[in-house]
Amino acid sequence: MTAMRPDGTKHPGEYLKEMMAEMGWLQRDLAFVLGCHEASLNTILSGKRGISPDMAKALAVAFSRPAEFFAELQQAYDLAHAQAPKPSVSLRAKMQNSYPVREMIKRGWIEDGDASTLEGQLIRFFGVSHADEIPYLAHAAKKSHYEAREIPPAQLAWLFRVRQIAKSISVPRYSEHALREALRRLRLLLSTPEEARHVPRILMECGIRFIIVERLPHAKIDGVCFWLDRNVPVIGMSFRYDRIDNFWFVLRHEIEHLLQGHGLEEEVIDSELEGEHAGTGISVSEEERIANAAAGDFCVPHDKLESFMKRKYPLYYEKDVLAFARILNTHPGIVVGQMQHRLDRYNYLKKYVVKIRQWVLPGAMVDGWGQTVPISL
C-alpha cells in the first residue's frame, strides 16, 4: 500500500513505485532503462528529490506516458507543499485593484507598510470610520455616493487629496463681490504667460482655497469646485495639460461654478474638459454649459471671436490671428486655443500654445511634480 502525506498528496516517487510494480520492475531495472545510477533514482523514489523536466521526458518514454503526466505530478506536489500566501496579499491586491496605491505612496499621500496599516491609512484618507465604507472597497451591496456618481477611483483619490490640503490651509473670508471684482484683474493677466503667477494670490485674497494637485496616472481630471462649508469655497486644478489656453479656460470654468453656487451640495468634478465637453451643446449639462460659456467668453469674447472668424473665413492667416490677439491684449495661444476648439483642428498654429505651469506653481499650494504637502493621517 502506498504511503500518503498528511495532506493526502503523494510524492511523485510513490507513483513511480506503483508503476514499477505494475511493470514488475525493481529499482535497478528502472535505472537500467533510464540509463542512470540507481542512487540518483533512489532520491526520487524516496521523496528527497523531485522530477525534473528532463527526467519527466525520460520517464514518458520508459512508461509510454505523456511527459506532462509526470511534470503535473511534480507540480501538484510542489503546490500542495508550497507555503500559503500571507492574508495581506489578498488585501493588498484588492486595494491596488481599486486605487493606484503604489503611486499614492510614491507621492507621499500615504506611507508604505503592511496591509492592515495601509488599510487604516485609506480609512483616514477617505474620512470614513471603517474599511467597508471606503468607496470601491466596500463589501456592502449598496454603493457609496461616489460610486453611484461613477467617479473613477483615481479621480476620487485626487479629489480627496485636494480636500485634505484645503482643510489644512487658511485664507481670508470668502467674498463673492471680491471675486467678481477680481475677474477684471485676472482678465488683464492674459497677455503673457508670466502674469499667471499672480493668480494664486488674487484668488486667496478673495477667500478661495486654490489647490493644484498633479493628477494620478490615467485620471483625466482637469479641475474641481466644492465648498468645505457655505463660506469656504475650494478650487482644485490638475494641470492635465500644460497649455496657456487650457489653464485659463479651466480656471475661469471653476470660478463660474463658484459664482453660480455650484458644488454646494456635492463636488463638481470636471474631467476631459475639451472638445464637446468644453462646449455648450445639448450633450452638456446646464451647469457645465454655463461654466463653459463663461470660460470661453473670458478667454476670447464670444462676439469678437465670432466676428473675426466670419470676416476671415475660410482662411485664417497667422498674421491676422496675431493682430487679433494684440487688439484683445491677449496671448496668441489663448486665441489659438479657442479657434482650435471652434475649427476642431488641434494642430492649428499650435506653436503659440505655450506652457504656463512654471509660472503658476511657485506661488500656489502645490502637491505633485516632486512636491508633497505634509499632511498627517
Image (cartoon, rainbow, N blue to C red):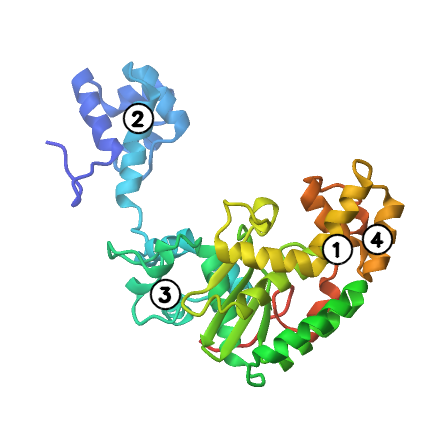
Task: Give the percent coordinates (x, y) of residue 123.
Answer: 36, 69
Dot placed on the residue nearer the N-terminal end, 2 or 4: 2
Image quadrant holding the C terminus, namely: bottom left
Label 4, on which residue? 324
Could you tell which of marks 3 and 2 lies nearer the N-terminus? 2
Alpha carbon of mark 1 to alpha carbon of mark 3: how far? 44 Å
Name the residue type under label 1.
Ile
Dot 4, how many residues are within 10 Å of its Cα: few (below 14), some (14-19), or many (20+)? some
Q: CA distance from mark 1 to mark 4?
A: 11 Å
- Element type at mark 4: helix
Could you tell me the amino acid type at mark 2?
Answer: Phe
- Of the two numbered discs 1 and 4 in the rendering, the one whose residue sits closer to the viewer: 4
Q: Is residue 309 left or right of residue 2?
A: right
What residue does disc 1 label? 334
**Quarter placement of the N terminus:** top left
Asked whether, in this view, residue 12 is left or right of residue 330, the answer is: left
Which residue has dot 2 on it? 70
Q: Write down the quadrant of residue 38 in the picture.
A: top left
Q: Is there CB contact under 8 Å for labels 1 and 3? A: no
Query: From mark 3 to mark 2, how far is it between C-alphas?
Result: 43 Å
Tag of residue 119: 3
Residue at the spot 31% in from the left edge and 33% down from the top edge: 74
10 Å crowding of disc 2: few (<14), some (14-19), many (20+): many
**Amino acid type of the residue that numbered disc 3 sits on in the rendered structure:** Glu
Mark 1 surroundings within 10 Å by alpha-carbon count, few (fewer than 14), some (14 through 19), many (20 or more): many
Q: Secondary structure at mark 2?
A: helix
Q: CA distance from mark 2 to mark 1?
A: 70 Å
Residue 89 on image: x %, y %: 35, 55
